[in-house]
């Protein structure tokens, strides 16, 4: 059986990492073999590029950001995502290309069409089977992130940046309504996980 590819998206502080761990455990309880990964990252090269991209001391051109994201993504697809799916495993990925549209286009202002061209070249039509978009206000996201760790290069941006990022996610959701499911991430952990479970069960375990 061919595996599934599920991505989790949202601005910083939306709670993706917490819910990613829970979702992996839930799927395993359903008898599914799961691979958990992240972007940028997932491979040795991807993790090296992640460190560069998130380094607060770096001042990268926005084109450079996008190209590095897709370079890491090409390796990630080749080394991790596609092989796992071919083995029948379900891949859970913390961020994927929707994040590039949201951050590099919505947040930083790169042309939407430029990212679409890179997406077509690198992914050759491959898209996630399902994307869970954890929608949270920038104010709450910042408060949550600040309690956890020192902000990285993107997390240190102002709320106006994250307003634009959120708008990018919403535009992407309008373009792919069958793939992207919005989850209100302003609620409690229990409420959010109940919403996730409902989406997964309805789609895959009716």
Image (cartoon, helix red, strand yellow):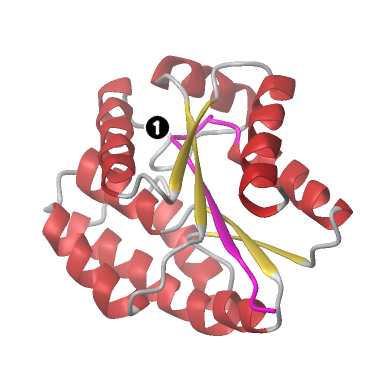
Is 172 situated left or right of 139 in this image? left
Q: Nearer the viewer, residue 88 or 62?
A: 88
**What residue is at 24 percent from the left and 31 percent from the top?**
164
For the record, the magenta segment spans 1-15
x, y (%) of residue 171?
25, 39
Membership of 61 in magenta stretch: no
Can the viewer see residue 61 in this picture? no
Q: Is residue 5 magenta?
A: yes
Residue 177 percent location from the top left of the image: 36, 44
Q: Is residue 167 above or below residue 106?
A: above
Residue 166 at x, y = what percent?
33, 32
Chief secondary structure of the magenta span? Answer: loop
Residue density around tag 1, few if under 14, some if 14–19, many if 20 or more, within 10 Å: few
Please state the horizontal and vertical placement of residue 96, each as a whole percent of the image: 45, 58
Q: Residue at x 61, y 40 (%)?
A: 199
For this view, does 173 lie left or right of residue 41? left
Q: Image point 64% across, 30% down: which residue?
A: 195
Mark 1, residue position: 156
Given residues 8 and 70, the one toward you in this image is 8
Relative to residue 49, is residue 202 drawn left or right? right
């Amino acid at each position: 059986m061919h595996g599934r590819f599920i991505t989790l998206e949202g601005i910083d502080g939306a709670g993706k990492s917490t819910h990613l761990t829970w979702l992996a455990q839930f799927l395993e309880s359903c008898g599914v073999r799961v691979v958990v990964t992240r972007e940028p990252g997932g491979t040795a090269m991807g993790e090296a590029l992640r460190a560069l991209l998130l380094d607060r001391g770096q001042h990268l051109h926005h084109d450079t950001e996008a190209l590095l994201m897709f370079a890491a993504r090409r390796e990630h697809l080749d080394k991790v995502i596609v092989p796992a799916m071919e083995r029948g495993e379900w891949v859970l990925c913390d961020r994927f290309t929707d994040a590039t549209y949201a951050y590099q286009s919505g947040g930083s202002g790169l042309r939407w069409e430029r990212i679409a061209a890179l997406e077509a070249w690198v992914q050759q039509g491959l898209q996630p089977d399902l994307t869970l978009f954890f929608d949270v206000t920038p104010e709450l996201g910042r408060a949550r992130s600040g309690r956890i760790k020192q902000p990285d290069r993107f997390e240190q941006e102002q709320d106006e940046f994250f307003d634009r990022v959120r708008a990018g996610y919403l535009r992407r959701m309008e373009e792919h309504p069958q793939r992207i499911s919005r989850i209100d991430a302003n609620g409690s952990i229990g409420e959010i996980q109940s919403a996730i479970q409902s989406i997964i069960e309805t789609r895959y375990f009716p």
